[in-house]
Amino acid sequence: MAVVLLLLFQLLHLVLSVSATNAGTSTSNVLANRHLRAVATKLANHGEPLSERANDLWALHDLLLIGYHGVFLAPHSPAKREVRDHATSLAKLLPSVHPLKQCRNVIAQVIGKSEKPNISAVAETAWACLPAKFSAADFDQAFLKETDAAAAKMPHPKEPEILGTCKGSGWPRTCSYWVALHLMAFRADALQLGAQFVHAVVPLLAGGALVCNGCTQHLMALHKPVLSESMWRDRSNEL
Protein backbone atom coordinates (compact mmCIF):
# COMPACT_ATOMS: atom_id res chain seq x y z
CA MET A 1 0.00 0.00 0.00
CA ALA A 2 2.94 2.36 0.58
CA VAL A 3 3.79 2.06 -3.10
CA VAL A 4 0.19 2.80 -4.06
CA LEU A 5 0.11 5.92 -1.89
CA LEU A 6 3.44 7.11 -3.21
CA LEU A 7 2.24 6.63 -6.78
CA LEU A 8 -1.00 8.46 -6.10
CA PHE A 9 0.66 11.53 -4.70
CA GLN A 10 3.48 11.55 -7.23
CA LEU A 11 0.75 11.57 -9.87
CA LEU A 12 -1.01 14.37 -8.04
CA HIS A 13 2.29 16.26 -7.97
CA LEU A 14 2.54 15.83 -11.74
CA VAL A 15 -1.04 17.05 -12.22
CA LEU A 16 -0.50 20.16 -10.15
CA SER A 17 2.94 20.86 -11.60
CA VAL A 18 1.77 20.58 -15.21
CA SER A 19 -1.21 22.84 -14.53
CA ALA A 20 0.94 25.38 -12.74
CA THR A 21 3.46 25.38 -15.56
CA ASN A 22 0.69 25.86 -18.11
CA ALA A 23 -0.52 28.82 -16.09
CA GLY A 24 2.93 30.38 -16.30
CA THR A 25 3.73 29.82 -12.63
CA SER A 26 7.06 28.38 -11.62
CA THR A 27 6.54 25.07 -9.87
CA SER A 28 9.38 25.94 -7.52
CA ASN A 29 7.06 28.58 -6.07
CA VAL A 30 4.26 26.07 -5.71
CA LEU A 31 5.98 23.19 -3.98
CA ALA A 32 9.15 23.28 -1.89
CA ASN A 33 9.92 19.59 -2.21
CA ARG A 34 13.11 19.54 -0.18
CA HIS A 35 11.42 21.08 2.85
CA LEU A 36 8.31 18.93 2.38
CA ARG A 37 10.37 15.75 2.43
CA ALA A 38 12.04 16.87 5.65
CA VAL A 39 8.65 17.42 7.27
CA ALA A 40 7.32 14.10 6.00
CA THR A 41 10.42 12.27 7.25
CA LYS A 42 9.98 13.78 10.70
CA LEU A 43 6.35 12.65 10.73
CA ALA A 44 7.32 9.11 9.76
CA ASN A 45 10.07 8.96 12.41
CA HIS A 46 8.49 10.86 15.27
CA GLY A 47 4.76 11.07 14.61
CA GLU A 48 4.43 14.88 14.52
CA PRO A 49 5.50 17.56 12.04
CA LEU A 50 7.59 20.52 13.14
CA SER A 51 5.34 22.98 14.91
CA GLU A 52 6.41 25.92 12.77
CA ARG A 53 5.21 24.09 9.66
CA ALA A 54 1.88 22.88 11.05
CA ASN A 55 0.04 25.95 9.74
CA ASP A 56 0.69 24.61 6.23
CA LEU A 57 -2.18 22.20 6.89
CA TRP A 58 -4.79 24.98 6.68
CA ALA A 59 -6.32 23.78 3.38
CA LEU A 60 -7.58 20.58 4.96
CA HIS A 61 -10.56 22.82 5.68
CA ASP A 62 -11.03 23.33 1.95
CA LEU A 63 -10.40 19.72 1.00
CA LEU A 64 -13.25 18.71 3.28
CA LEU A 65 -15.69 21.51 2.53
CA ILE A 66 -15.09 22.11 -1.18
CA GLY A 67 -14.83 18.37 -1.66
CA TYR A 68 -18.15 17.88 0.10
CA HIS A 69 -19.89 20.40 -2.14
CA GLY A 70 -18.47 18.92 -5.36
CA VAL A 71 -18.31 22.29 -7.08
CA PHE A 72 -17.56 20.73 -10.50
CA LEU A 73 -20.52 18.32 -10.30
CA ALA A 74 -24.11 18.65 -11.45
CA PRO A 75 -26.62 19.55 -8.69
CA HIS A 76 -28.61 16.70 -7.17
CA SER A 77 -26.63 14.13 -9.15
CA PRO A 78 -25.38 10.71 -8.01
CA ALA A 79 -21.81 12.03 -8.18
CA LYS A 80 -22.75 14.92 -5.89
CA ARG A 81 -24.12 12.45 -3.36
CA GLU A 82 -21.01 10.31 -3.79
CA VAL A 83 -18.56 13.07 -2.88
CA ARG A 84 -20.59 13.92 0.20
CA ASP A 85 -20.18 10.34 1.35
CA HIS A 86 -16.44 10.48 0.63
CA ALA A 87 -16.06 13.78 2.51
CA THR A 88 -17.78 12.13 5.45
CA SER A 89 -15.35 9.21 5.20
CA LEU A 90 -12.36 11.56 5.19
CA ALA A 91 -13.73 13.50 8.16
CA LYS A 92 -14.09 10.27 10.14
CA LEU A 93 -10.51 9.32 9.26
CA LEU A 94 -9.04 12.58 10.56
CA PRO A 95 -8.97 11.51 14.23
CA SER A 96 -6.53 8.85 13.03
CA VAL A 97 -4.63 10.39 10.12
CA HIS A 98 -4.40 14.12 10.86
CA PRO A 99 -0.69 14.89 11.37
CA LEU A 100 -1.20 16.88 14.60
CA LYS A 101 -2.19 15.08 17.79
CA GLN A 102 -4.03 18.13 19.12
CA CYS A 103 -6.13 18.19 15.94
CA ARG A 104 -6.81 14.47 16.04
CA ASN A 105 -8.14 14.84 19.56
CA VAL A 106 -10.37 17.87 19.02
CA ILE A 107 -11.74 16.60 15.71
CA ALA A 108 -12.60 13.32 17.40
CA GLN A 109 -14.58 15.29 19.98
CA VAL A 110 -16.46 17.22 17.27
CA ILE A 111 -17.34 14.04 15.39
CA GLY A 112 -18.22 12.02 18.47
CA LYS A 113 -20.25 8.96 17.57
CA SER A 114 -22.07 10.58 14.66
CA GLU A 115 -22.32 8.48 11.53
CA LYS A 116 -22.69 11.66 9.46
CA PRO A 117 -20.73 14.44 11.16
CA ASN A 118 -21.32 18.08 10.29
CA ILE A 119 -18.67 18.67 7.63
CA SER A 120 -18.67 22.43 8.13
CA ALA A 121 -17.99 21.97 11.84
CA VAL A 122 -15.18 19.49 11.18
CA ALA A 123 -13.67 21.83 8.58
CA GLU A 124 -13.80 24.80 10.96
CA THR A 125 -12.11 22.66 13.61
CA ALA A 126 -9.38 21.69 11.13
CA TRP A 127 -8.61 25.41 10.92
CA ALA A 128 -8.96 26.26 14.60
CA CYS A 129 -6.83 23.38 15.92
CA LEU A 130 -3.69 24.58 14.12
CA PRO A 131 -1.16 26.82 15.92
CA ALA A 132 -2.47 29.92 14.08
CA LYS A 133 -6.05 29.10 15.15
CA PHE A 134 -7.31 30.03 11.69
CA SER A 135 -10.76 31.33 10.87
CA ALA A 136 -12.30 32.78 7.72
CA ALA A 137 -11.05 36.21 8.77
CA ASP A 138 -7.45 35.06 8.26
CA PHE A 139 -7.82 34.72 4.46
CA ASP A 140 -8.41 37.23 1.69
CA GLN A 141 -11.19 34.94 0.43
CA ALA A 142 -12.54 31.88 2.20
CA PHE A 143 -14.73 29.04 1.00
CA LEU A 144 -17.64 28.61 3.42
CA LYS A 145 -20.50 27.67 1.10
CA GLU A 146 -20.88 26.38 -2.46
CA THR A 147 -21.48 29.81 -3.98
CA ASP A 148 -18.05 30.93 -2.70
CA ALA A 149 -16.22 28.71 -5.21
CA ALA A 150 -15.44 31.37 -7.83
CA ALA A 151 -14.43 34.07 -5.34
CA ALA A 152 -12.34 31.65 -3.27
CA LYS A 153 -10.65 30.00 -6.23
CA MET A 154 -7.18 31.14 -5.11
CA PRO A 155 -7.25 32.11 -1.42
CA HIS A 156 -4.21 33.55 0.33
CA PRO A 157 -3.55 33.69 4.07
CA LYS A 158 -3.38 37.32 5.13
CA GLU A 159 -0.21 36.58 7.15
CA PRO A 160 1.82 34.22 4.94
CA GLU A 161 4.85 34.56 7.20
CA ILE A 162 3.21 32.16 9.68
CA LEU A 163 3.47 29.34 7.12
CA GLY A 164 6.40 26.96 6.86
CA THR A 165 7.07 25.00 3.69
CA CYS A 166 4.36 26.95 1.85
CA LYS A 167 5.64 30.39 2.78
CA GLY A 168 6.02 32.37 -0.43
CA SER A 169 4.11 29.90 -2.59
CA GLY A 170 2.23 31.42 -5.48
CA TRP A 171 -0.41 28.71 -5.09
CA PRO A 172 -1.03 28.52 -1.32
CA ARG A 173 -3.95 26.06 -1.39
CA THR A 174 -2.14 23.76 -3.79
CA CYS A 175 0.93 23.74 -1.58
CA SER A 176 -1.16 23.10 1.52
CA TYR A 177 -2.93 20.19 -0.17
CA TRP A 178 0.41 18.74 -1.20
CA VAL A 179 1.82 18.92 2.33
CA ALA A 180 -1.35 17.68 4.02
CA LEU A 181 -1.96 14.76 1.65
CA HIS A 182 1.58 13.48 2.02
CA LEU A 183 1.63 13.75 5.79
CA MET A 184 -1.77 12.08 6.13
CA ALA A 185 -0.71 9.34 3.70
CA PHE A 186 2.22 8.48 5.95
CA ARG A 187 -0.06 8.05 8.94
CA ALA A 188 -2.73 6.23 6.95
CA ASP A 189 -0.21 3.73 5.66
CA ALA A 190 1.28 3.15 9.12
CA LEU A 191 -2.21 2.55 10.55
CA GLN A 192 -3.24 0.29 7.65
CA LEU A 193 -5.82 2.84 6.56
CA GLY A 194 -4.20 3.56 3.22
CA ALA A 195 -6.92 2.13 1.00
CA GLN A 196 -9.67 3.96 2.89
CA PHE A 197 -7.72 7.20 2.72
CA VAL A 198 -7.08 7.01 -1.03
CA HIS A 199 -10.69 6.05 -1.77
CA ALA A 200 -11.92 9.02 0.27
CA VAL A 201 -9.55 11.62 -1.21
CA VAL A 202 -9.45 10.94 -4.96
CA PRO A 203 -13.20 11.54 -5.61
CA LEU A 204 -13.04 14.80 -3.64
CA LEU A 205 -10.24 16.05 -5.87
CA ALA A 206 -12.08 14.88 -8.99
CA GLY A 207 -15.28 16.57 -7.83
CA GLY A 208 -13.69 20.00 -7.71
CA ALA A 209 -11.66 20.38 -4.50
CA LEU A 210 -8.73 21.66 -6.58
CA VAL A 211 -10.96 24.45 -7.96
CA CYS A 212 -8.83 24.27 -11.08
CA ASN A 213 -10.07 22.99 -14.43
CA GLY A 214 -6.74 21.83 -15.81
CA CYS A 215 -5.64 20.22 -12.55
CA THR A 216 -8.92 18.31 -12.27
CA GLN A 217 -8.87 17.13 -15.88
CA HIS A 218 -5.34 15.81 -15.52
CA LEU A 219 -6.13 14.10 -12.23
CA MET A 220 -9.23 12.41 -13.65
CA ALA A 221 -7.31 11.17 -16.68
CA LEU A 222 -4.64 9.66 -14.45
CA HIS A 223 -7.15 8.05 -12.09
CA LYS A 224 -9.82 6.95 -14.54
CA PRO A 225 -9.81 3.30 -13.36
CA VAL A 226 -10.73 4.26 -9.79
CA LEU A 227 -13.40 6.87 -10.52
CA SER A 228 -17.06 5.95 -10.79
CA GLU A 229 -19.05 6.30 -13.98
CA SER A 230 -21.18 9.00 -12.37
CA MET A 231 -18.07 11.03 -11.55
CA TRP A 232 -17.37 11.25 -15.27
CA ARG A 233 -20.98 11.73 -16.35
CA ASP A 234 -22.31 14.21 -13.81
CA ARG A 235 -20.10 17.20 -14.58
CA SER A 236 -21.30 20.79 -14.37
CA ASN A 237 -19.86 23.98 -15.82
CA GLU A 238 -16.41 24.23 -14.27
CA LEU A 239 -15.00 27.52 -13.05
Image (cartoon, helix red, strand yellow):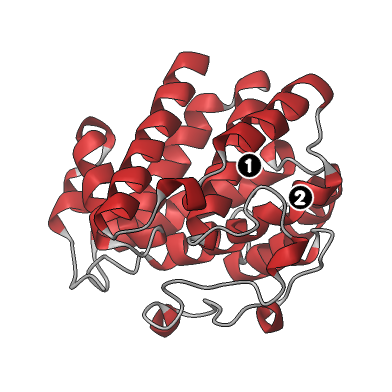
Residue 118 got which mark? none
User: Of 121 and 101, which appears nearest the observer?
Assistant: 101
Residue 54 got which mark? 2
Amino acid at the residue labelled 2: Ala
Camera sees residue 112: no
Q: Position of residue 162 (x, y in %)?
A: 77, 63
Earlier in the chain: of badge 1 and badge 2, it is: 2
In whole angstroms, how far apart are the C-alphas of marks 1 and 2? 18 Å
Decide if residue 212 is on the left or right side of residue 183.
left
Amino acid at the residue labelled 1: Leu
User: Of 95 and 139, which appears nearest the observer?
Assistant: 139
> Nearer the viewer's eye, disc 1 or disc 2?
2
Decide if residue 18 is on the left or right side of residue 59.
left
Camera sees residue 226: yes
Q: Give me the residue at 58% from left, 82% from top.
A: 140
Q: Position of residue 226 (x, y in %)?
A: 27, 33
User: Of 130 and 198, which appears nearest the observer?
Assistant: 130
**Badge 1 element:** helix
Q: Residues within 10 Å of mark 1 (few under 14, many from 20)?
A: many
**Badge 2 element:** helix
Q: Give me the residue at 63% from left, 29% from top.
A: 37
The residue tagged 1 is: 93
Q: Quadrant of residue 68?
A: bottom left
Q: How many badges with numbers are in the image?
A: 2
Q: Position of residue 48 (x, y in %)?
A: 81, 35
